[in-house]
C-alpha cells in the first residue's frame, strides 16, 4: 500500500492528491465562476442534485405572477374566477467533458530541466479555467456560432445547446436592427448601461424584470476592446468626463479607474472585463460570427444554472487520471461531468424566453 512520499505514478492515491489542487487552481483562474453559488439569488446558481443521485437532466420550474388580475373585495364572487397557476419549464443537461495530454518519449524528461508532469498539470488547469469562461459567456451571450456549422457541438457551450436570445433581452444601441449593422457610433458607453438598468427593472420592457445579484448589484461583462473604448470616450457625462471630474475634485490618480485594470461601478452595475466575451452573431446565418462586434453580458439573479455530476462535487469538480502505457509512455486526463445553461423559461415544447440576463452587442473592432 502506497504511503508517505512513496506514491507510484499509477497510484489511485496520487490521483486524489492532484485532484483538489487541479479543481482549485482551475476554478480560481475562471473569473466567471466567481458568480456561481448555491444561493437562489446568485447570478449563476450552482445545483448539487446530480452529485447526490443519478440522471443527466434537471427540470427547472418558474411560475410567473399575473399582474393583470385585480383581486377581490367584499361582494365579489370568488368561486369559479380563481387564477390559474402557470408553470414554465427549462431543462439543464449534464455530460462528460475532458482533455488529455501525453508524453510519448521516455527520454523527454531527460532532455529538459523542467518537470513535464507538472507542466501537464498546469496546462490542464489552464485549459479548464478557459473552458469555464467560454462556456458560461457563450451561453449567456447567445453565441450560437460556438456550436459549429452543424449546430451540434456543445463542448464550448456548457454541454447544452445555445438558444438565440429573444428580442426583449437583447439591446443594440441606437435602435440598430442586427449585430452586423453596428458601427463606430455604437462603441461601449455609459449611456448603454443606463438603458440596460432601466429595461432590467421595468415591465415596460420585460415581462419578468431582472432582480439584482446577491450583492445588490447588476453585473456587466465587457471585452477588453470595449474597456478601451469606454476609457477613451470623451462625450459629456461619459466615463472619461466623470473620471476627470473626480481627479479635479482631489481623487488621486492611483485610486482612479484610469489607473486600475477594471472599470468599477456605475448606476447600480458592477463592470467587469473578460477576454472571452464572444463576438457578434450574424442575423442571416446564426453559425457565423461578426468580427467587429462583442456581445457584452448584463446579469442579475439566476442568469444561468451550473451543475456537476455524481462524484464531481465540492472541491472535486474535476478529476485527474494518470495512465502508463507501453511501460514508459505516460498520459493524463482531466475531466468532469457538468452542464451550464443560460436560464430560459417557456411552456413545455414552446418558445423559451431568457430570464435573468440581457445581451448588449457593441461595436468593438
Image (cartoon, rainbow, N blue to C red):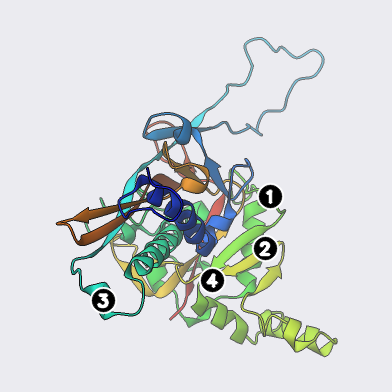
Circle 3 sits on which residue? 110
Q: Residue 322 in the image: x percent, y percent?
A: 30, 53
Circles 4 and 1: CB atoms closer than 8 Å:
no
From the viewer's perspective, is the residue at label 2 or at label 1 nearer? Answer: 1
N-terminal-most mark, 2 or 1: 1
Label 4 near label 2: C-beta < 8 Å? no
Work out how far the residue at label 2 is from the one at label 1, CA to CA, in angstroms.
13 Å
Nearest-to-viewer mark from 4 and 1: 1
The numbered disc on residue 269 is 2
**Comes first in the chain, label 3 or label 1:** 3
**Residue occupied by mark 4:** 174
Gap between marks 4 and 3 measured at Cα: 61 Å
Element assignment for label 2: strand
Determine the secondary structure under disc 1: loop
Q: Quadrant of residue 156?
A: bottom left
Q: Are marks 2 and 3 in contact (CB under 8 Å)?
A: no
Residues at marks 4 and 1, CA–CA distance in whole angstroms: 31 Å
Amino acid at each position: 500500500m502506497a504511503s508517505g512520499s512513496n506514491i507510484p505514478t499509477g497510484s489511485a492515491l496520487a490521483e486524489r492528491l492532484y485532484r483538489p489542487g487541479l479543481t482549485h487552481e482551475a476554478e480560481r483562474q475562471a473569473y466567471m465562476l466567481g458568480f456561481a453559488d448555491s444561493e437562489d439569488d446568485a447570478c449563476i446558481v450552482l445545483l448539487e442534485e446530480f452529485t447526490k443521485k443519478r440522471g443527466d437532466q434537471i427540470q427547472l420550474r418558474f411560475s410567473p405572477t399575473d399582474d393583470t388580475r385585480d383581486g377581490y373585495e367584499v361582494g365579489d364572487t370568488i368561486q369559479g374566477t380563481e387564477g390559474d397557476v402557470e408553470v414554465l419549464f427549462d431543462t439543464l443537461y449534464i455530460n462528460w467533458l475532458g482533455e488529455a495530454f501525453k508524453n510519448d518519449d521516455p527520454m523527454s524528461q531527460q532532455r529538459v530541466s523542467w518537470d513535464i508532469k507538472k507542466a501537464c498539470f498546469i496546462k490542464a488547469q489552464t485549459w479548464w479555467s478557459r473552458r469555464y469562461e467560454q462556456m458560461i459567456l457563450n451561453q449567456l451571450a447567445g453565441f450560437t456560432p460556438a456550436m459549429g456549422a452543424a449546430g451540434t457541438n456543445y463542448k464550448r457551450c456548457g454541454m447544452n445547446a445555445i438558444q438565440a436570445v429573444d428580442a426583449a433581452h437583447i439591446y443594440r444601441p441606437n435602435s440598430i436592427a442586427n449585430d452586423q449593422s453596428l458601427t463606430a457610433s455604437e462603441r461601449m458607453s455609459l449611456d448603454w448601461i443606463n438603458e440596460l438598468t432601466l429595461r432590467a427593472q421595468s415591465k415596460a420592457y420585460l415581462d419578468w424584470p431582472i432582480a439584482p445579484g446577491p450583492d445588490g448589484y447588476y453585473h456587466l461583462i465587457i471585452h477588453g476592446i470595449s474597456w478601451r473604448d469606454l476609457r477613451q470616450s470623451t462625450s459629456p457625462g461619459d466615463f472619461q468626463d466623470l473620471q476627470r471630474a473626480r481627479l479635479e475634485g482631489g481623487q488621486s490618480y492611483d485610486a482612479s479607474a484610469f489607473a486600475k485594470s477594471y472599470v468599477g461601478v456605475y448606476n447600480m452595475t458592477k463592470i467587469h472585463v473578460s477576454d472571452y466575451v464572444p463576438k457578434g452573431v450574424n442575423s442571416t446565418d446564426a453559425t457565423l460570427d461578426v468580427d467587429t462586434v462583442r456581445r457584452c453580458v448584463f446579469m442579475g439573479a439566476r442568469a444561468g444554472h451550473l451543475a456537476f455530476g455524481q462524484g464531481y462535487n465540492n472541491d472535486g469538480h474535476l478529476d485527474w487520471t494518470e495512465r502508463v502505457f507501453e511501460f514508459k509512455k505516460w498520459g493524463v486526463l482531466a475531466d468532469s461531468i457538468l452542464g451550464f445553461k443560460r436560464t430560459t423559461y417557456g411552456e413545455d415544447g414552446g418558445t423559451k424566453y431568457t430570464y435573468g440576463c440581457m445581451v448588449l452587442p457593441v461595436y468593438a473592432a
